[in-house]
Every structure is written in structure tokens, then in C-alpha cells.
Amino acid sequence: MLDNSKILILTGFEDFLNLGRNPSALVAQAFDQKMVQSGVKIKSVVLPVDYMALPQSIDTLLDDPIFERSAPVGILSLGLASNRQVISLEKVSLNLIDSSHPDNAGRILLDTPILAIEQNAYFSTLPIGKIVKNLEHENFPCEISYSAGTYLCNMAMFLFLKKIQERLWQIPCGFVHLPPDQKLDSLSDWSFEKLQKSVLTILQAMI
């Protein structure tokens, strides 16, 4: 059985806004239980697009008994940015929900803190410079983004970073927005396989 210290968490989001497909979930699922560089095994989870359910899903994931003795080696969260055509490495998450788009339970939250008594922001602990270098070396268009939005993606990033700080886990943790693949947007430059390969590059850079 694999040592607990050699598990890397990879998350995506379920379908939302009636798009019919969310590549972030499909990419995450494609890596589940797969081995990547240095013998690290991926544990994949698809998160709900639901303001009420998301915090509990994150707690359940991180409270898994496999992490009682040893932290995961990293946490990478994926989301879909349907209006972008590059891999976006998110630098910062804000303590804010402010979106006119409903979650999958129909809730719309405006100008609402994620947590009422909490710091205003958390910064990614991913090795972003290394990831950018590796992605560019493999000819995957990418950017460093300073806005993860104010919807569920930003919320997930904020909560994961808060949780690793509370647990004193000094690990790479952050969020990456994926562009749509060609099955979601016929004009996209990204096949599903290309998205998978780009995420593998990111995972390997985290180890």
C-alpha cells in the first residue's frame, strides 16, 4: 500500500450553469489513482457547485483518515474558465462571494464574505514560477492570474488554503483555471488530451 505521504489531491468541479460538461471534473477523474512522477498517487474528487455543500465536501476530503499521520504532498484544484484560452494559474483568493450566477442549488450571493471573521485573502503556495516555466517549455499557453473570480472557484481556493494553514501543512496548494476543451467550445485550441497533458505538467512541477 502506498505511504500516506505520497498522495496528491486533485479536484475538479461538477457541471454548472447548464453547460453540459465541465472539463475540470473530467480531467481530475482521469487522473484518479494514477501514479505520477516520483511515485506519487493522485486522489481525485469532484466538488459540488454549491455554496452550502462545498465547505463540508472540503472538510470531508481533508479529514480522511489517510491524512491523520501524514499530510498530502500537495493539493491542486481545477476549475473551468469558459472565456479564457490559456491555463490560468491563480495567485490569490479573496474572502468574497459576489456573483450574479447561481450555484447549482439556485442560490445567488452578492458581496458576501466566505467566512465572516477571517483574513481578507490567501495566496497560492504552488511553485507558480516553476509551473509557468515547465508549461511554456511544453508549449502550453499559460498566464499568472491575480483574480480567481468571486464564485465557487475562488471559494474553494480560499478554503483549501485556510485549511492547510490550520493543519500546519506546508505543502503546495492552489487553483488553476482551465480553458474549455473542443467538446465544450468548437473554437477552442484545446483538445481534452491537451488539457490532460498540461495538468500532468503542473502536477509534476508540484512534486
Image: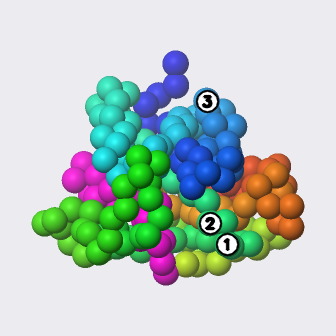
Residue at 82% x, 52% y: name it.
Answer: 183
Residue 127, image x, y percentages: 53, 67
How crowded is the residue under tag 3: few (<14 C-alpha within 10 Å), some, or many (20+)? Answer: some
Q: Which residue of the protein is positioned furthest toward the front in this rendering?
A: 106
When asked about the image quadrant of residue 40, the answer is top right
Q: Evaluate whether residue 134 shows in this view.
A: no
Residue 154 shown left or right of residue 187 in the figure: left
Determine the main secondary structure of the stretch shown in magenta. Answer: helix
Q: Mark 2 sits on what residue?
A: 81
Question: Does 166 appear in magenta?
Answer: yes
Instruction: Measuring from the top left, give residue 118's x and y in whole percent.
Output: 18, 67
Left or right: residue 113 versus residue 24 is left
Which residue type does callout 3 highlight? Gln
Q: Nearer the viewer, residue 79 or 32?
A: 79
User: Residue 124: which disc?
Assistant: none
Residue type at tag 2: Ala
Residue underneath mark 1: 83
Which amino acid lies under the numbered mark 1 shown in the image of this protein?
Asn
Q: Position of residue 174 (x, y in %)?
A: 47, 61
Mark 3 or 2 closer to N-term? 3
Q: CA distance from mark 1 to mark 2?
A: 6 Å
- In the rendered image, residue 131 lying in the magenta stretch gets the answer no
- Give, as a single range, the part of the protein colored magenta: 146-168
How far apart marks 3 and 2 lie (CA) works out to: 26 Å
For the residue carrying disc 2, how many other residues have a C-alpha within 10 Å: few (<14), some (14-19), or many (20+)? Answer: many
- Determine which residue is flagged by label 3: 33
CB-based contact (under 8 Å), mark 1 and mark 2: yes
Give the number of the mark in front: 3 or 2: 2
